[in-house]
Image (tube, rainbow, N blue to C red):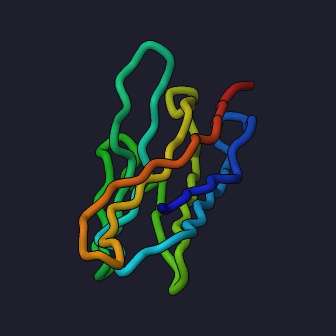
Amino acid sequence: QVQLVESGGGLVQPGGSLRLSCAASGSIFRFNAMGWYRQAPGKQRELVATISNSGITNYADSVKGRFTISRDNAKSTYLRMNDLKPEDTAVYYCNADVISPGYARQVYWGQGTQVTVSS
């Protein structure tokens, strides 16, 4: 079993910055990709950014140029969010697409962290 724990959310003024962190633990043979998704009230969960095992990144058009996803050599991914806007307000979820030690592909989600952008 794999656990994902997010941190770094909070309340920030428009134009401000936040850095989200996601730490994975458990039995992982290899990561295929890690990513961040968000869900605003009354809306469907949407992709924010992903990063593949080889470091290829993908961003939603709405965050390109403002958000940066990264990973370290351990089991963590980060989302640096600059120039935040009220429409970025949402619960942000970490996602991990992994290969288990038994070579099964599995997808895991964190519990979510609230980001609120408001003056």
Q: Nearer the viewer, residue 26 or 115?
A: 26
- Could you say where residue 90 lies in the image, as x and y percent from the top left? 54, 30
* Residue 29 image-quadrant placement: bottom left
Q: Residue furthest bottom?
A: 73
* Residue 35 image-quadrant placement: bottom left
Q: Residue at x 35, y 78 (%)?
A: 101
Q: Residue furthest front?
A: 102
- Could you say where residue 84 lies in the image, as x and y percent from the top left? 58, 41
Q: Residue at x 58, y 60 (%)?
A: 22
Assign the C terminus to one quadrant of the image. Answer: top right
- Could you say where residue 14 lies in the image, as x and y percent from the top left? 65, 35
Q: Residue furthest left?
A: 104
Q: Nearer the viewer, residue 119 or 75?
A: 75
Q: Is residue 54 left or right of residue 95?
A: left
- Could you say where residue 73 lies in the image, as x and y percent from the top left? 51, 86
Q: Residue at x 62, y 55 (%)?
A: 5
Image position of 92 with respect to 1: above or below: above
* Residue 111 image-quadrant placement: top right
Q: Nearer the viewer, residue 13 or 94?
A: 94
Image position of 66 with respect to 77: above or below: above
For the image, the number of numbered tags is 0
Q: Is residue 3 left or right of residue 117?
A: left
